[in-house]
Amino acid sequence: MVKNNLLALLIMCMCAEFNLAVAADKPESAVAGKPELAVANKPESAVASKPEIYRLHQGDTLEISVWKENDLQKPAVVLPDGSITFPLAGRLEVVGLSTTEAEQLIAAKLKTYLPDPTVSVVISGIAGNTAYVLGKVIHPGSIVINGPLSVLQAISTAGGFDKFADEGGIKVIRENSNHQSLLSVNYKNIISGKDMSTNIQLKANDTIVVP
């Protein structure tokens, strides 16, 4: 009888030690009866790049009107010197301005004659937003930039290269405020997908030269 009691006590002690060992291996949440929570990494939020505000160029056509002033509604073309003329406001430098800035400029000039002018400027033609492709392409000439336009897209619009084109010597001439800069284009890297950094987004008055 005593032996049986001792044997039972020994088995109980062994079971207790085993339970303690298993509990020590479990995470705290599992011991407490709580399910483990998987922490998912939040993906980085993609920042949507906003398109650049359109700036007026020489050759752009505008429709300008003043609210409740029928005599102050007229079209205007941005001249080569970057200016327009408008009744009462006279000559105005608008090249490089957004339509909102042009509205504010015209309204400021009209305040001499009108108490609180509300001016609207609408772009009806963007002939001034033009790039050029010159040299050994099938159809050299000008291209109106209606939206984002890369070097590769412009060359495609010009019909592609002729058989004598030097694909390794393509350049983009860019006009800045006081000078011109020369940008290199690595055509082989672009078409191979190796490096797209020289597939430049064109701006007004850029000139692609294909030797």
Image (cartoon, helix red, strand yellow):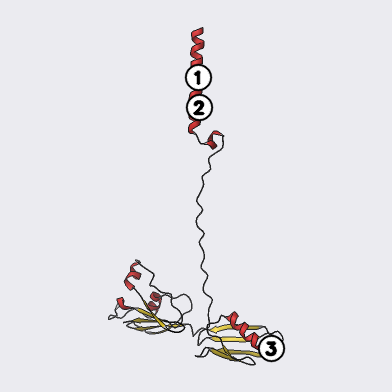
Q: Position of residue 147 (x, y in %)?
A: 48, 76
User: In the displayed image of the protein, which residue is found farthest to the right?
Assistant: 115
* Apparent side of residue 131 relative to residue 90 in the rendered image (left or right): left
Binning the other alpha carbons within 10 Å of mark 1 as few (below 14), some (14 to 19) or many (20 upward) gives few
Q: What mark, if any, has residue 13 been given in the picture? A: 1
Q: Hey, what amino acid is under mark 3?
A: Glu
Q: How many marks?
A: 3
Q: Nearer the viewer, residue 143 or 53?
A: 53
Q: Position of residue 190 (x, y in %)?
A: 35, 70
Q: Position of residue 44 (x, y in %)?
A: 50, 57
User: Distance of mark 3 from mark 2, alpha carbons?
Assistant: 91 Å
The reply to whether the C-beta atoms of the residues labelled 2 and 1 are less than 8 Å apart is: no
* Apparent side of residue 29 relative to residue 144 in the rendered image (left or right): right
User: Distance of mark 3 from mark 1, alpha carbons?
Assistant: 101 Å
Q: What mark, if any, has residue 69 been given in the picture? A: 3
Binning the other alpha carbons within 10 Å of mark 2 as few (below 14), some (14 to 19) or many (20 upward) gives few
Identify the residue at horizontal 53%, vertical 36% (top origin): 28
Q: What mark, if any, has residue 20 been given in the picture? A: 2
**Which of pointers 2 and 1 lies earlier in the amino acid sequence?**
1
Check disc 3 and report its element: helix, strand or loop: strand
Q: Nearer the viewer, residue 101 or 191?
A: 101
User: In the displayed image of the protein, which residue is found farthest to the front?
Assistant: 178
User: In the displayed image of the protein, which residue is found farthest to the left?
Assistant: 164
Identify the residue at horizontal 48%, vertical 9% (top origin): 3
Q: Position of residue 97 (x, y in %)?
A: 55, 82
State the image quarter where residue 187 is shown: bottom left
Q: Hey, what amino acid is under mark 2?
A: Leu
Q: Hey, what amino acid is under mark 1?
A: Cys
